[in-house]
Image (cartoon, grey):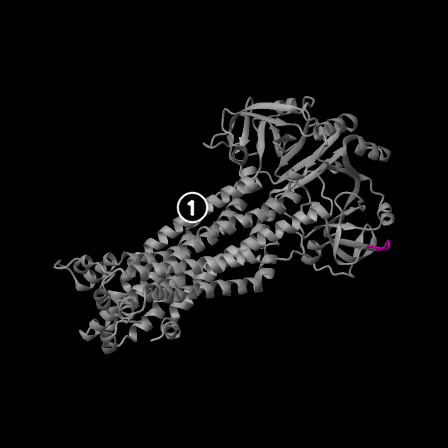
Amino acid sequence: MTLNKRYLRNVKENLSFYVAAAVLTVVALLLFYLFYIAGTGIKSYGDQFFIDNKLEDATFTTYVEIPDNEITNIEKKYNVTFEKEHYVNINEDGYKVRVFKRNKKIDLYEVIDGNDISNDDEIVISKGYAESEHVSIGDRLTIKGKEYKVTGYFLRPDYLYMLENTDDSYKNITSFFLAYMTDSAYDALEANSCQYKVVYSDDSDVTQFRKDMNEQYKINSYLAKDNNQRITMVDDQAIMFLIMAFVFLFTLPLITVALIAIIIGRKIKQEQKMIGTLSALGYTKSQLMQHYSVLAMIPGLAGGIIVTIITKIIQQPYGELSLADYEPMPVKFTLPIPIALIGIIIPTVIYMLEAEHKVSKLLKKDTVEMLNGNADGDSRTRHVLAGKKGKVRNKFALRSILANPGRSFVVFLGAFLGALMITVAFMFIDSINNVIDKGADSMGSFKYEYVLNRLKTDEVAGADELVIGKYEHNGSAFSLIGADTDVKYLNIDTEDGSRADISNGYYVTNVMAYAYKLEAGDEFTFVNPVTMEEKKVTISGIIMNDSQKMIVCSQDNARKLLGWNDGTYNGLLSEKKLDLGDEISKTVTSDDIREQMKTILTEMGAIIYSLAVIGAIICIAALYVSVNMLISENRHNMSMLKVLGLKRREINRMIIDVNHVIIPIGIAVGMLAGYLMMVVVFRIYSGIEGVLYTPAITFKSIILTIIIVLVCYAVSLLIVRRKADRVDMVESLKDNRE
């Protein structure tokens, strides 16, 4: 007898197992592959684009304009690259456009579709807006009464994440975009807004540069690239994908591979008569171990190859889904060969090792025991509940669970994996919705927030006056907010629900406390980014605000820190629109905040819902394999019960429905594990992005998770019961094999 002849027959006889195990291997690795590809693709493209297009180290504005003839002197003196950037903001009917004059040294734009401008009636625009509003190359746009022909789309390194204002929460590409035109066309706009870009070298004295710029030209605002969300969001989102990739790598694939390995072990146990026969015929231990390890490698090898092929096919479209938050970058998403090989080799090796271990363990037993099918059994479990009162059906079911903990554990893992994945998907949605619902409300009850372009002293009816300043801690920016103790529209509620006494204290928001590891009583040191002057305060308590890093104090204390005159302020909160003319530098509404926040849920919807779909596939496949194994191991018992005259429904209750008790446990533990996993993910991401994502799951999501897993279980049972119905009484009694 040649063992090689058994390969094909074994695969045919156990085809459902091999298919289900391969499917599980595929879906377990697929999420890791896709999230890894998305994260590495975005990060590598962004890093290279920043280098190629001369990304700034900082942007700043001054009250006193720096003369053009001083630019070269500044570069030499401080060993920096320095450039004045001209731009103008233009409001047209239905959209806002920020037109730049072309830079030569820093933050260079790159045309990625179409052609660059060459004539005064031509314009290139940012691609995100063009795709969103269906502006095609060749279309015409009107700016300040003149039509310009769109010749192409571009990217620039400091706007890969399209925020109109750097402190906006989320992008707006439906009404705001960037544009370039020729220098002569730009000059015709009679624009005079400017800002300064700087790139430091390794030996630049950054602190001295900032101090001297402030002393000579009076810096109005200074924004380092590490505090510029238009720039940092590229890395932040990429890192989020990588975090998810490795979370899935160390949970889903490992658990799934372990599940399949256990099932392979039990499948070999069913083969003990055959192994005993082959051993008696003279086949050596190494030959038998090799034979069964080859059989075991099939689902691993097949699954690894299939998932690699699937990934190669969908990597680009799926990767582009991950770009929804950014300007449309021409990222080439690809699965690295070493990562693909890992996905193929590791499951295959684990399955083979489990098979070799199981065969080796069986071969240590007596051949007669293997031929009788008792080599790997525990005689103690055969008499569980023997002689005890109760229904035979219930005693049989309970004995099946107690006597086969490994098999029961496999069923548990099937429900566990499905519940875990579906919970993760729903928690993504619920947690983001929670941020949307509570984010704006946690800031306060205002409908309009105004930041002024100059300091005011006169009162404005129906509004809260604020003193707003910007500070840094270890290079990370936050806001200083000074308010009256009776402030109406700003939230100053503490953790216990009471209002903070800001008259003499300094309170931090809970997201800031989390980011900087602050508690009440801590001494906190920070720096004025303009003057580089160091300040120090003692934290009095924590205000509940999940989306803004702020210190809140009295107006007087805020003005002392900033060095402003008594009675001055530069911000307003109101529940109605105010007419402040040209005094307004920026206006933000609470509706704007909510709408901006909703974009992240809309844009990532496809990726999030794919988690639920994959969870359902895992659940069906895992439960099918688990329950199918139950049928295979009980063919002899089922035949006997049929011979005894039991009906199909009664046999199903005794053999198959025993899992009904295990499934709820698997669902409960899987949901708990999914919740805990997302707690870890959101905490890590909160530290990166500066928004405190509080894990949340609604009662509706809990019920839906339970229903989906139960439906998957029902589908698995439906398939398996058809197989159970085909069990032959006589044939199974002769040969207890699948």
Horizontal side of 501 relative to 147 (left or right) equals left
Q: Position of residue 365 (x, y in %)?
A: 24, 61
Residue 714, visible in the rendered structure: no
Q: Is residue 612 above or below residue 494?
A: below
514 or 468, nearer to the observer: 514
Identify which residue, 20 or 269, lies in the foreground. Answer: 269
Q: Is residue 360 left or right of residue 565?
A: left
Above-or-below relation of 719 to 326: below
Write down the residue under mark 1: 676
Which of these two is toward me, 514 or 282?
282
Tell me if I can see residue 482 in this picture: yes
Magenta region's main secondary structure?
A: loop
Residue drawn at the location 78% of the way across and 29% of the way down:
217
Quarter of the picture containing the C terminus is bottom left
Number of residues whose C-alpha sits closer than 10 Å to that of mark 1, classed few (under 14), some (14–19) or many (20 or more): some
Question: Which quadrant of the structure image shows residue 643?
Answer: bottom left
Residue 46 locus on image (x, y percent): 66, 49
Residue situated in front as seen by the camera: 668 or 25: 25
User: Which type of secondary structure does the marked residue at label 1 adopt?
Assistant: helix
Q: Is residue 118 magenta?
A: yes
Q: Which residues are magenta?
A: 117-121
For the N terminus, give its image quadrant.
bottom left
At 13% from the left and 59% from the top, the residue drawn is 389
**Kind of residue at disc 1:** Leu
| Image location (x, y in percent) of residue 169 | 61, 43
* Residue 315 x, y percent position in the rendering: 58, 60
24 drawn magenta: no
Question: How many tags in the picture?
Answer: 1
Q: Quadrant of residue 569?
A: top right
* Side (left or right) of 358 relative to 184: left
* Residue 231 quadrant: top right
